[in-house]
Amino acid sequence: MEDGRASSAMPLLSLAFSNKANGRYLLAGDPGKVVLPIYLEQAIPLFAALRGRQKLTRIDILRRGVSPKHLKILAVGSGGGSAARFTATAYTTDEDGTHLQIEVALGPEHVVHLQAHILALIQLHYPWMEQRTAADILLSAAHPAEVVASSPETTPHQLPQAEESPPDRERAARAIFAIGIHRWPAGRRDVVRHIQENFSAAEMDRLVKAGNRDDWSVWDEVANSLTA
């Protein structure tokens, strides 16, 4: 903000959790609603959580001058039918110090809806990126999300962290191209091609994650080795 005017804009998603009364959600008229701003940094672990990467994920939304807000995603089943795949719990503390918490069930249709909106958010940031590439980068960039401490109803052995499957070589190669051409400052196609042809899927996956942290040291080492 400069001189009372916005100097930049940041795309985000807004998730509103509202209570229900007489079969209808209260929404704007709900004093106990919890509205979560989902920026890119929260969209990445949320996307991974909705892909079932682990049993329990907590996402913290911390903004200066605003009460911390939190989102907890619990995978409760893989099923179809009326069984929900996940529960989502939003909680915060309002200006009066009142604890607000709302839990909702997410069925497969809700999961698809949220994932589609997250991909749309990515494309607002990077309009040139294909959806499939965006999904690959989201999953590659996601760090293991925090597993919430157990409660009396959920003991630690009930919440094992899901093992990640080895990265797919073709998917890793696409992510290398997207990161290497569009984000790496050097942007050298010969280096990108060398990595795609000579590095394993796991090595490419590590390079993608490093690039998402703006750590280009290994990328630059590879480039220097090709020009030496």
Image: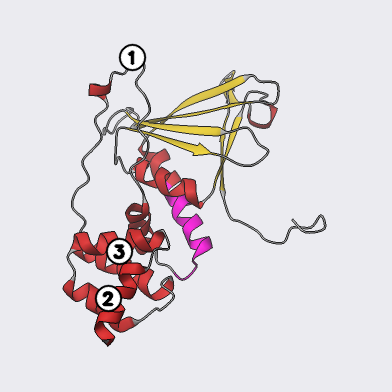
Relative to 210, is 113 above or below? above
Q: Quadrant of the N terminus?
A: bottom right
Observer able to see residue 192: no
Inspect the image, locate mark 3, and give the three-letter code of the amino acid beneath it: Leu
Q: Secondary structure at mark 3?
A: helix
- Side (left or right) of 17 relative to 49: right
- Whether residues under marks 3 and 1 lie with C-beta atoms below 8 angstroms apart, the answer is no
Sooner in the amino-acid sequence: mark 1 or mark 2: 1
Relative to 127, is 40 above or below? above
| Residue identified by numbered label 1 | 153
For the point 58% across and 33% down, the residue is 68
Q: Quadrant of residue 74?
A: top left
For the point 63% across and 32% down, the residue is 67
Sooner in the amino-acid sequence: mark 3 or mark 1: 1
The one of 144 and 131 positioned closer to us in this rendering: 144
| Residue identified by numbered label 3 | 207
Q: Which numbered circle lies on residue 222?
A: 2
Q: Secondary structure at mark 2?
A: helix
Inspect the image, locate mark 2, and give the three-letter code of the amino acid beneath it: Val
The one of 153 and 112 positioned closer to us in this rendering: 153
Where are the magenta residues, as a range? 115-128
Is 186 included in the stretch rendered in magenta?
no
Q: Residue furthest front?
A: 228
